[in-house]
Image (cartoon, helix red, strand yellow):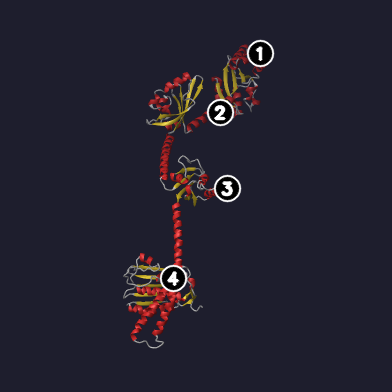
Amino acid sequence: MDLPLEATQSVVSVLAAAAGGGLATGIGGTLAWLGWRRRRYRRRVARAIDGRIDGVAVYDGRARLIASNEAYQNFFRPGLDRLETGMRFADVVEVGGEALGRDQSWRTAKLVSWRAGMVGEEDVCADGRWVAVHTYPLPDGGQLRVLRDITQRRQVEESLGSTVTWLKGVMDTVLDGILTIDETGMVLSFNPAAQRIFGYDADEVVGRNVTMLMPAVFAAGHQDHIDRYMKTQQRHVIGLGREVRGRRRDGSEFPLDISVAEMRQGDMTTFIGVIRDITERKRVETALIEGEARFRQQASRLQAIIDNMAQGVAVFGADDTLSALNQAARRMLGLPEAELEPGAIELTLLLALLVPAETTPGPAPVGETVRLAEALRRQKDMVFEQRGAAGTVLEVRASAMPGGGVILSLTDITERKRTEQTLRDAKEAAERGNRAKNTFLANISHELRTPLNAIIGFSEMMKHEIFGPITPVSYRPYLDDIHDSGMHLLELINDILDMSKAEAGMTDLVETVVDVAGIIRASARMLARRAANAGLTVEAHLPEGLPLLLADERRMRQIVLNLLSNAVKFTDEGGAVTITARADADGFVIVVTDSGIGMSAEELVRVMEPFVQADSRLSRRYEGSGLGLPLTKALVEAHGGHFELDSRLGQGTTATVTLPAWRITPLGAS
């Protein structure tokens, strides 16, 4: 196929326009030697376009492929083997469409491009490379087609697009407001966080001056600051953060932190502002400042309170350092005002101050202080005594504080210790006096018993007229009085001796199995005549089969007689005295109830004291020594039991004796 010289020159000129001077020079230099022979021409055209980076193909006026380089052919893989010189452009499109898997619309578009031409249209190859297609018409109606690999550019563009998308996502999601302005103060961008902070939509702010977001007092000089910076480059805000005030859409002002950065792109300067609404932070800061002021005020008030306390107070934190010390503690420890400020001493050192000044220094006092401090750290709640300044005795109470630490309260108990010693001395003196009293009573009772036994014995002999009748008969009543008085005095002396033994804890019990029911019935019969003379009734209500009791029979009879005689004595005419007994899980219980005069709560306490009666007046109606109830209580307790009185003034009295259950013995047991 012959190619006119004019076509050859056209190819050279188009190649020069498409590929630059290097390609044009190569083709021009080569084609200058072509001549009219077709075969040499084709070889030299192929040689001119081979080795080029871009894919180059030359089509003649009949749309036939004249020549193409290897780079052009590689874009048609995997249909490369079907691409041949001399193919029509439509066939080349068909080969490319099949190789790339394109549809009919793609093929149609490529055929249309033969007539319309293509300038930088992008397409993708089978191996994923991107190409830009450029077409250049030739004078003979042919066409020069250049395929340029733009894969790297596409990758850069995609990377930049991803970066821009990522940055936009960051700007749209960050909590801080971000806005950009130019050197005239015009807002270029306004992210969603800034929209939330100021209350404006982006389209209301972008393109307007940033001063719309400032209070009027700051807006007036804002542009002057920008102009001054652009001229002097002296930074006051750029690259620094500062606290300013902003203005919301509703006109309200609020505090914000802003940091400004500068970005230069050629002759254009952009300022990037990162904004944070610090309204809540300022509120918290204000609350903290106010809270600290209140805390200091409360601390001063608390210090004043503890300074006015009589007790010494020392407060230690969780790290054992002193937090507070009141005036009383300073005084008790003998410290000047300027010493031992909070934080200047720890627990062990303060405890060392409690050691008396006259104590000889050495390992013993120091070791004791260390042991005491360790004990306080392990067990916060403690009470111990130490000596303070000038020999005073201090009671130290340690109490744990919430969250760690300990409070030591110091109380000067020197006077209390003296009082306790005085009381101990008085107690010992009273005990000595009581022992002397008991000894005296025992001795005097023994001395009284000897003549009383003679009086009682001789009066009984005379009453029974053992040595003959007594004349005149009028002496008999006097003998009865002598005998009765002697017996009464003997009983009184015996009660005194028993009471003395009971107070000394020396009551002797001769324990046997006792028929308590028999004792109760005998005692009731013994007092029946006396009760009848007073217009009273004495009744015993006992259950059948009442068990026996392991006890001292004489003492049990004494208990029952004391309670019954006491009830008869304090019950007026027409009254009744009742005695009952039972045995159950609570023990052996004896109850004496009367309808007598009764007692008040104060009298119930007094009658349990020896030699005291409820009616203590000189003109009292009821005689007696006042030993009956105290002695009864002592005898019951000597048996391991419990004695209780219940009475209401004018409503009678109930006396209850409860003996331990282990003393109960079934009937028939020995």
Q: Provide residue 296's location: percent of width, then percent of height.
A: 42, 39
Q: CA distance from mark 2 to mark 3?
A: 79 Å
Residue contact between numbered discs 4 and 2, judged by CB atoms under 8 Å: no
Query: Which one is earlier in the sequence, the residue at label 2 or at label 1?
Result: 1
Give SS at disc 3: helix
Q: CA distance from mark 4 to mark 1?
A: 160 Å
Q: CA distance from mark 3 to mark 4?
A: 57 Å
Give SS at disc 2: helix
- Report crowding for label 1: few under 14, some 14 to 19, many 20 or more residues within 10 A (C-alpha): some
Q: Which residue is mark 2?
A: 159
Q: Nearer the viewer, mark 2 or mark 1?
A: 2
Query: Which one is earlier in the sequence, the residue at label 4 or at label 2?
Result: 2
Q: Which residue is mark 3?
A: 363
Q: CA distance from mark 4 to mark 2?
A: 120 Å
Looking at the rendered structure, the kind of residue marked 3 is Pro
Query: Which one is earlier in the sequence, the residue at label 3 or at label 4?
Result: 3
Vertical relation: 454 (above or below) 244: below
Q: Which residue is mark 4?
A: 441
Q: Provide residue 573's location: percent of width, then percent of height.
A: 31, 75
Q: CA distance from mark 2 to mark 1?
A: 42 Å
